[in-house]
Amino acid sequence: MLEWLLGPRIDTIDGQELARRLKDSDAPYVLDVRLPGEFRQGHIPQAHLIPLGEVSRRLDEIPKDRTIVTVCRSGHRSAIAAQQLIRAGYDVKNLAGGMSMWRGATTR
């Protein structure tokens, strides 16, 4: 019943673990759901930008054979995206604290 009220349970990943996993051969697909201007200010180098409002209609651009890590500024928008993706059958983790907690390299 709680899942019906709150949505599916979302696993999280912290910044250190994500930075480590991005070096692996089976690195997760990083999905940044912020707006283009936010993305240009700095993003995880491997990130792919699909703003939150576009995620549901751009699912065909997101691989189903990899873990997806959703990212935004604080973790709220990316949690919403993660719920959408989980309902669509994706394996998803949300970056805990979003970019505000990311300590790895960023690209501008």
Image (spheres, grey):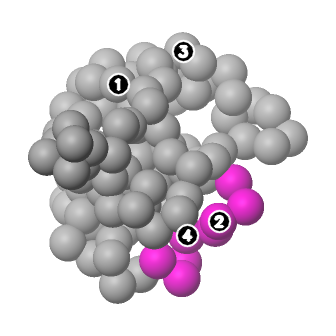
Kindly check if marks 1 and 3 are in contact, taking CB atoms under 8 A apart as contact.
no
| Left or right, 68 with reference to 38 | right
Cα separation between marks 3 and 2 = 24 Å
From the image, tell me which residue sits under label 3.
16
Residue 23, percent from left and from top: 76, 31
| Disc nearer the start of the sequence (2/1) | 2
Quadrant of the frame with the N terminus: top left
Q: Are marks 4 and 2 in contact (CB under 8 Å)?
A: yes
In the rendered structure, the answer to whether residue 3 lies left or right of residue 22 reads left
Element at label 4: loop
For the point 35% across and 84% down, which residue is it? 57
* The magenta segment: 59-66
The answer to whether 64 is drawn above or below residue 30 in the figure is below
Amino acid type, mark 4: Ile
Count neighbours of disc 2 (C-alpha within 10 A) and say few if under 14, some if 14 to 19, many if 20 or more.
some
State whether the magenta stretch is mostly helix, strand or loop: loop
In the picture of the structure, the residue carrying the numbered disc 2 is 64
**Viewed as shown, does residue 107 lie left or right of 33?**
right
Say if 8 sits above or below 66 in the image: above
Is-magenta flag for residue 93?
A: no
Image location of residue 107, percent across then percent down: 46, 43
Residue 21 found in image quarter: top right
Between 9 and 79, which is closer to the camera in this rendering?
9
The image shows residue 66, relative to residue 103, as above or below, that is: below
Q: From the top left corner, tell me how far across and down residue 43 is, in percent.
A: 40, 44
CA separation in Å, label 2 and label 1: 22 Å
3 or 2: tag closer to the N-terminus = 3
Query: Which percent across, then down, holds residue 106?
Result: 45, 35
Identify the residue position indicated by label 4 in the image: 62
Query: Identity of the amino acid at label 2?
Result: Lys
Give the residue type that dot 3 points to.
Gln
- According to the image, label 1 marks what residue? 96
